[in-house]
Amino acid sequence: MEEAAAPERKRPRDGDVGPSTAAAAAAASGEAQYVYLPIADALKAPGARVCLFAAVSEIGAAVRSRGTDFTLTLRIVDHSRASAISVTFFADNTALLPCVRSSGDVISLHNVVITMHHGEFFVTYNKRFSSFALFEGKVSTGCIPYQHSMKYHGSKHDSEFLTHLRMWLVYNPPGEYVTAS
């Protein structure tokens, strides 16, 4: 009888945020585990890959980039930061971009990169390693995304983050966010 090979350990990349003890235990069990950061905390680590759960405050239009991709910019907000921050998505075609139904919907972002340009922070979605899922922002709706990227894998704790963000949205509805320019 052959023994199963041990899973290959991956070397951390520069800028990656280290896993918590719970995340390490989940990784050892083979379960997908993501450590979601509040936006304000994520901004303290420019260049790092982070995971965010946030509300969509503004929805841009999909346009062709200067290269071969299509791009879309959303603005997101959460309880940790009064002003919205831009998230820029790149994809080979528009069908792979998020299609947000309405302002106030919730987005889960995995492995996005915090960047700074001309003194302003941005979140960049890299089509090679980032992933997303969109959920309705209404409290009474389920915890199943209405759209997700092919690489997205949720965790068992996603419903908790989603419920907390939806409750926050009840008292902080879309349109009341401050948009930094």
Image (cartoon, grey):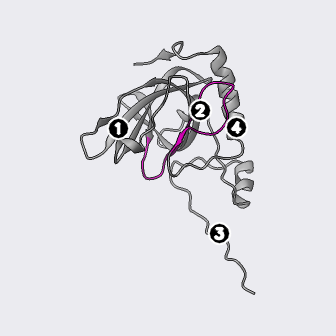
> SS at mark 4?
helix
**Foreground mark, 2 or 4?**
4
Residue hosting label 1: 71
Where is the N terminus found, in terms of image quarters? bottom right
Residue hosting label 4: 159
Res 100 label: none
Q: How far apart are marks 2 and 4 (CA)?
A: 21 Å
Q: Distance between the residues labelled 4 and 3?
A: 28 Å
Res 7 label: 3
Q: How far apart are marks 2 and 1 (CA)?
A: 26 Å
Is residue 132 a member of the stretch shown in magenta? yes
Residue hosting label 2: 41
> SS at mark 3?
loop
Where is the C terminus found, in terms of image quarters? top left
Q: Is residue 48 above or below residue 100?
A: below
Q: Give the range drawn in magenta.
A: 125-148
90 or 79, which is in the foreground?
90
Q: Which amino acid does label 3 sit on?
A: Pro
Which mark sits nearer the N-terminus, 2 or 1? 2
Q: What residue type is labelled 1?
A: Thr
**Foreground mark, 4 or 3?**
4
Is residue 20 a member of the stretch shown in magenta? no
Q: In this view, does 30 lie above or below 103?
A: below
Which mark sits nearer the N-terminus, 3 or 2? 3
Q: How far apart are marks 3 and 2 (CA)?
A: 31 Å
Which mark sits nearer the N-terminus, 4 or 1? 1
> SS at mark 2?
helix
**Magenta stretch, overall SS:** loop
- Callout 4: few (<14), some (14-19), or many (20+) C-alpha neighbours within 10 Å? some
80 or 99, which is in the foreground?
99
Residue, x 69% and y 56% (percent of image)? 31
**Foreground mark, 3 or 2?**
3
